Image: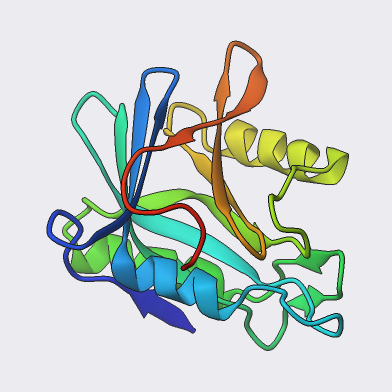
Amino acid sequence: MIKTATSVAGDCMYCFEGYGRRVIVNDEVAEVWHEHRQTVVTACESFGVLMGTTSVDRREIWIEAVTTPMPRDRHSRFSFALRDPGHQRAVCRKFTSSDGRAIYLGTWHTHPEPVPKPSCIDRSDWVTCLRANRGRPLAFVLVGTKEVRVFVRSRGRFRPLQRRCKSDGFN
Protein backbone atom coordinates (compact mmCIF):
# COMPACT_ATOMS: atom_id res chain seq x y z
CA MET A 1 0.00 0.00 0.00
CA ILE A 2 1.25 3.48 -0.80
CA LYS A 3 0.40 6.34 1.47
CA THR A 4 0.64 9.65 -0.31
CA ALA A 5 0.95 13.09 1.16
CA THR A 6 -0.14 15.96 -1.02
CA SER A 7 1.31 19.18 0.33
CA VAL A 8 4.71 19.38 1.94
CA ALA A 9 5.19 23.10 2.41
CA GLY A 10 1.96 23.76 4.28
CA ASP A 11 1.70 20.58 6.32
CA CYS A 12 5.09 20.00 7.94
CA MET A 13 4.87 17.59 10.88
CA TYR A 14 8.62 17.16 11.18
CA CYS A 15 11.68 19.05 10.07
CA PHE A 16 15.16 17.65 10.69
CA GLU A 17 18.43 19.48 10.07
CA GLY A 18 22.14 18.92 10.31
CA TYR A 19 25.30 18.21 8.36
CA GLY A 20 24.27 20.69 5.68
CA ARG A 21 20.95 18.94 5.05
CA ARG A 22 17.30 19.40 5.83
CA VAL A 23 14.54 16.75 5.74
CA ILE A 24 10.91 17.86 5.83
CA VAL A 25 8.14 15.35 6.45
CA ASN A 26 4.48 15.86 5.59
CA ASP A 27 1.81 15.39 8.30
CA GLU A 28 0.21 12.46 6.47
CA VAL A 29 3.51 10.57 6.27
CA ALA A 30 4.18 11.24 9.96
CA GLU A 31 0.71 9.89 10.74
CA VAL A 32 1.52 6.65 8.88
CA TRP A 33 4.62 6.28 11.04
CA HIS A 34 2.60 7.00 14.18
CA GLU A 35 0.04 4.32 13.27
CA HIS A 36 2.77 1.71 12.70
CA ARG A 37 4.75 2.18 15.93
CA GLN A 38 5.58 -1.04 17.79
CA THR A 39 3.75 -0.15 20.98
CA VAL A 40 2.69 -3.67 21.97
CA VAL A 41 5.03 -6.64 22.52
CA THR A 42 3.43 -8.65 19.71
CA ALA A 43 3.89 -5.95 17.06
CA CYS A 44 6.19 -6.75 14.15
CA GLU A 45 8.46 -4.19 12.53
CA SER A 46 6.77 -2.02 9.93
CA PHE A 47 8.70 -0.52 7.04
CA GLY A 48 8.65 0.88 3.55
CA VAL A 49 10.31 3.23 1.13
CA LEU A 50 10.43 7.02 1.17
CA MET A 51 9.41 9.03 -1.89
CA GLY A 52 9.42 12.72 -2.59
CA THR A 53 11.37 15.59 -4.03
CA THR A 54 14.61 17.44 -3.39
CA SER A 55 15.87 20.96 -3.79
CA VAL A 56 18.02 21.71 -6.83
CA ASP A 57 21.20 21.53 -4.73
CA ARG A 58 19.88 18.29 -3.11
CA ARG A 59 20.44 19.64 0.40
CA GLU A 60 16.70 19.65 1.17
CA ILE A 61 14.55 16.52 0.99
CA TRP A 62 10.76 16.60 1.14
CA ILE A 63 9.27 13.25 2.12
CA GLU A 64 5.85 13.26 0.46
CA ALA A 65 4.88 9.59 0.36
CA VAL A 66 5.81 6.23 1.87
CA THR A 67 4.93 2.62 1.29
CA THR A 68 3.94 0.28 4.09
CA PRO A 69 4.36 -3.52 4.46
CA MET A 70 2.98 -5.50 1.51
CA PRO A 71 1.90 -9.16 1.13
CA ARG A 72 5.23 -10.59 -0.11
CA ASP A 73 7.32 -8.77 2.50
CA ARG A 74 8.57 -10.61 5.58
CA HIS A 75 8.79 -9.19 9.07
CA SER A 76 9.05 -10.12 12.72
CA ARG A 77 9.45 -8.26 15.99
CA PHE A 78 13.08 -7.37 15.27
CA SER A 79 13.56 -7.71 11.51
CA PHE A 80 12.05 -7.15 8.10
CA ALA A 81 12.72 -7.84 4.42
CA LEU A 82 11.35 -5.66 1.63
CA ARG A 83 10.47 -8.40 -0.85
CA ASP A 84 7.26 -7.23 -2.47
CA PRO A 85 7.74 -5.67 -5.93
CA GLY A 86 4.90 -3.29 -5.05
CA HIS A 87 7.40 -0.96 -3.36
CA GLN A 88 9.31 -0.49 -6.63
CA ARG A 89 6.06 -0.13 -8.57
CA ALA A 90 4.99 2.62 -6.15
CA VAL A 91 8.28 4.46 -6.74
CA CYS A 92 7.85 4.15 -10.51
CA ARG A 93 4.24 5.39 -10.36
CA LYS A 94 5.23 8.36 -8.21
CA PHE A 95 8.10 9.21 -10.56
CA THR A 96 5.85 9.02 -13.63
CA SER A 97 2.91 10.92 -12.12
CA SER A 98 5.24 13.75 -11.00
CA ASP A 99 6.92 14.11 -14.40
CA GLY A 100 10.15 12.83 -12.89
CA ARG A 101 10.27 15.11 -9.86
CA ALA A 102 9.35 12.58 -7.16
CA ILE A 103 12.04 9.96 -6.56
CA TYR A 104 13.12 7.20 -4.18
CA LEU A 105 14.63 8.85 -1.09
CA GLY A 106 15.46 5.94 1.22
CA THR A 107 13.73 3.64 3.67
CA TRP A 108 11.91 3.76 6.98
CA HIS A 109 11.19 1.16 9.61
CA THR A 110 10.11 0.83 13.22
CA HIS A 111 12.02 -0.21 16.31
CA PRO A 112 10.41 -1.37 19.56
CA GLU A 113 12.26 1.22 21.65
CA PRO A 114 11.43 4.80 22.63
CA VAL A 115 14.48 6.44 21.01
CA PRO A 116 15.51 4.18 18.13
CA LYS A 117 19.17 3.47 17.43
CA PRO A 118 20.39 1.89 14.18
CA SER A 119 21.66 -1.67 14.42
CA CYS A 120 24.65 -3.04 12.53
CA ILE A 121 22.17 -4.64 10.13
CA ASP A 122 20.48 -1.25 9.60
CA ARG A 123 23.79 0.42 8.79
CA SER A 124 24.79 -2.37 6.42
CA ASP A 125 21.45 -2.12 4.60
CA TRP A 126 21.79 1.66 4.35
CA VAL A 127 25.26 1.30 2.78
CA THR A 128 23.74 -1.09 0.21
CA CYS A 129 20.99 1.45 -0.56
CA LEU A 130 23.56 4.23 -1.02
CA ARG A 131 25.70 2.11 -3.35
CA ALA A 132 22.65 1.26 -5.47
CA ASN A 133 21.65 4.95 -5.65
CA ARG A 134 24.94 6.78 -6.12
CA GLY A 135 24.58 10.54 -6.29
CA ARG A 136 21.07 10.54 -4.84
CA PRO A 137 20.48 12.24 -1.48
CA LEU A 138 19.08 9.47 0.71
CA ALA A 139 17.67 9.55 4.23
CA PHE A 140 16.89 6.68 6.56
CA VAL A 141 14.12 6.93 9.13
CA LEU A 142 13.77 4.96 12.36
CA VAL A 143 10.40 5.17 14.08
CA GLY A 144 10.54 4.43 17.78
CA THR A 145 7.69 4.24 20.25
CA LYS A 146 8.30 7.85 21.33
CA GLU A 147 10.57 9.50 18.73
CA VAL A 148 11.26 9.54 15.03
CA ARG A 149 14.91 9.83 14.00
CA VAL A 150 16.34 10.61 10.58
CA PHE A 151 19.86 9.52 9.60
CA VAL A 152 22.08 10.64 6.73
CA ARG A 153 25.59 9.63 5.70
CA SER A 154 28.11 12.35 6.46
CA ARG A 155 31.90 12.07 6.64
CA GLY A 156 31.74 8.30 6.33
CA ARG A 157 29.25 7.73 9.16
CA PHE A 158 25.50 7.63 9.61
CA ARG A 159 24.52 10.60 11.70
CA PRO A 160 21.16 11.63 13.18
CA LEU A 161 19.68 14.95 12.14
CA GLN A 162 18.25 17.25 14.81
CA ARG A 163 14.52 17.81 15.07
CA ARG A 164 13.64 21.48 14.36
CA CYS A 165 9.87 21.86 14.22
CA LYS A 166 6.79 20.78 16.16
CA SER A 167 6.98 19.00 19.49
CA ASP A 168 9.15 15.95 20.12
CA GLY A 169 7.53 12.55 20.15
CA PHE A 170 4.10 11.70 18.84
CA ASN A 171 2.11 13.67 21.38
Instruction: Residue 20 in the image: state x and y as whole percent.
Output: 37, 18
- Would residue 45 be found to the left or right of residue 18 on screen? right
Task: Name above or below for residue 81 compared with residue 108.
Answer: below
Corner quadrant of residue 154: top right
Residue located at (25% from left, 65% from top): 96
Task: Name above or below for residue 67 compared with residue 16.
Answer: below
Q: Residue furthest left?
A: 10
Residue located at (79% from left, 78% from top): 44
- Would residue 169 be found to the left or right of residue 4 on screen? right
Instruction: Residue 169 in the image: state x and y as whole percent.
Output: 51, 58
Q: Residue furthest bottom?
A: 71
Question: Nearest the camera: 88 or 127?
Answer: 127
Task: Name above or below for residue 11 compared with residue 148.
Answer: below
Residue located at (60% from left, 74% from top): 85
Question: Nearest the camera: 127 or 143?
Answer: 143
Corner quadrant of residue 72: bottom right
